[in-house]
Image: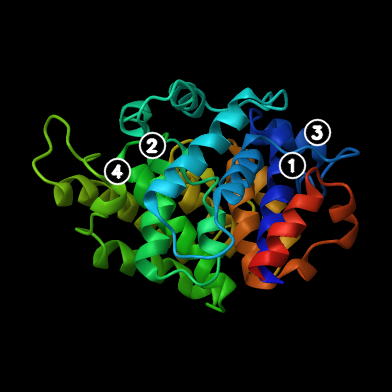
């Protein structure tokens, strides 16, 4: 039940991080105590745009592969526009997603709608379905993970961070030891540095100052490698009590959201609830950091790692469970 565990972990992290997102660590500790929030609050426990958009991506996925770029573009566009127009879209959504989805709603080609300079964490906070769907080939998983980001976030680092996030979830779900994850991510950065998925990304690379698609995508892999090197340095001298953002970034941008979420997970690799509390007790984009950290922990340990009572309170529990069952 690891796909289910990952999806619920993502939603739980989102719910824990939502009320702490714009607080300092001192303010969070004053409100919740030194361990930070320890469970989702409310009846129901509310999620944010992070889980909303993850579900939008999940709804766009076909029941079975293979994935087709044209069909995925149509399905993602429909789901993103539906999210844009939803009365529930009042959970502090990111401006990049709002601007790009508004342009998509006008029927503008995705290549013109995307925000070319944005590498915000909205690109990879929602990519878990590409990591969890079974039966995808490596290229298919990578290209679709990058493509779902490209509809809104056109920066190469947004694409690459989404690819890496999806593969981290995929690898953990399939039994990778958590301690092996940083090196696996670094290896992927080096191996994939000049791979451009033209069938999916078309001419996204074409812009001033870029001479080739391989040059374009290499910039994203190189920036993610810098973030992962910072992660490795942080884990060489782990400090459970310090804000992880001080070492791996505040998570507002995609590569930092990945690195800091993995950082939080690996500080407490066998304590999923503590992972969420640490991720929510951060000075940065706490809900996005915690939702990714929860996705990693749930993928590694399965749904049984979460308190059973939480699933009765979290918003969208039925839909999270339905996708989890399908992918498990």
Disc 3 or 4, which lies upstream in sequence?
Answer: 3
Q: In the image, 161: left or right of 326?
A: left
Disc 3 or 2, which lies upstream in sequence?
Answer: 3
- Quadrant of the drawing holding the C terminus: bottom right
Q: Which residue is mark 2?
A: 119
Contact, CB < 8 Å: mark 2 with mark 4? yes
Disc 4 packing (10 Å; few <14; some 14–19; many ≥20): many
Disc 3 or 1, which lies upstream in sequence?
Answer: 1
Distance (Cα) linking label 3 and label 4:
38 Å
Residue 184 shows in the view: yes
The percent coordinates of residue 321 (x first, y second) are 76, 58
Q: In the image, 151: left or right of 293?
A: left
Distance (Cα) linking label 3 and label 2:
32 Å
Compare residues 214 and 227 and report the one nearer the observer.
Answer: 214
The percent coordinates of residue 130 (x first, y second) are 51, 58
- The residue furthest left is 211
Contact, CB < 8 Å: mark 3 with mark 2? no
Compare residues 89 and 124 and report the one nearer the observer.
Answer: 89
Disc 4 or 1, which lies upstream in sequence?
Answer: 1
Q: Which mark is residue 156?
A: 4
Q: Which residue is mark 3?
A: 31
Looking at the rendered image, the disc whose residue lies closer to the viewer, 3 or 2, is 2
Disc 1 packing (10 Å; few <14; some 14–19; many ≥20): many
Distance (Cα) linking label 1 and label 2:
23 Å
The percent coordinates of residue 285 (x first, y second) are 57, 36
Q: Which mark is residue 15?
A: 1
The percent coordinates of residue 161 (x first, y second) are 40, 50
């Amino acid at each position: 039940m690891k796909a289910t565990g990952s999806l619920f972990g993502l939603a739980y992290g989102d719910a824990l991080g939502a009320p702490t997102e714009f607080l300092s660590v001192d303010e969070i500790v004053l409100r919740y105590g030194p361990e930070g929030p320890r469970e989702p609050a409310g009846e129901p426990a509310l999620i944010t745009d992070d889980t909303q958009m993850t579900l939008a991506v999940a709804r766009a996925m076909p029941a079975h592969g293979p994935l087709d770029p044209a069909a995925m573009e149509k399905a993602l566009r429909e789901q993103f526009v539906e999210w844009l127009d939803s009365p529930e879209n009042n959970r502090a959504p990111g401006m990049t997603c709002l601007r790009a989805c508004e342009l998509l709603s006008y029927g503008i080609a995705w290549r013109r709608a995307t925000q070319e300079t944005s590498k915000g964490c909205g690109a990879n906070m929602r990519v878990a379905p590409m990591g969890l769907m079974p039966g995808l080939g490596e290229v298919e998983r990578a290209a679709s993970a990058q493509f779902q980001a490209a509809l809104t976030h056109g920066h190469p680092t947004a694409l690459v961070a989404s690819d890496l996030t999806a593969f981290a979830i995929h690898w953990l779900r399939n039994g990778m030891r958590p301690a092996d994850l940083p090196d696996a991510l670094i290896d992927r950065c080096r191996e994939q540095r000049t791979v451009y998925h033209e069938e999916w990304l078309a001419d996204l690379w074409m812009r001033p100052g870029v001479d080739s698609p391989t040059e374009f995508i290499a910039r994203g892999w190189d920036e993610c490698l810098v973030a992962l090197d910072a992660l490795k340095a942080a884990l060489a001298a782990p400090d459970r009590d310090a804000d992880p953002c001080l070492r791996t970034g505040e998570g507002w941008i995609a590569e930092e959201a990945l690195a800091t979420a993995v950082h939080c997970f690996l500080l407490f690799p066998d304590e999923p609830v503590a992972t969420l509390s640490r991720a929510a007790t951060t000075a940065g984009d706490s809900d996005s950091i915690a939702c990714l950290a929860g996705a990693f922990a749930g993928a590694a340990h399965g749904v049984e790692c979460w308190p059973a009572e939480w699933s009765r309170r979290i918003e969208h529990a039925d839909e999270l469970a339905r996708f989890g069952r399908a992918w498990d």
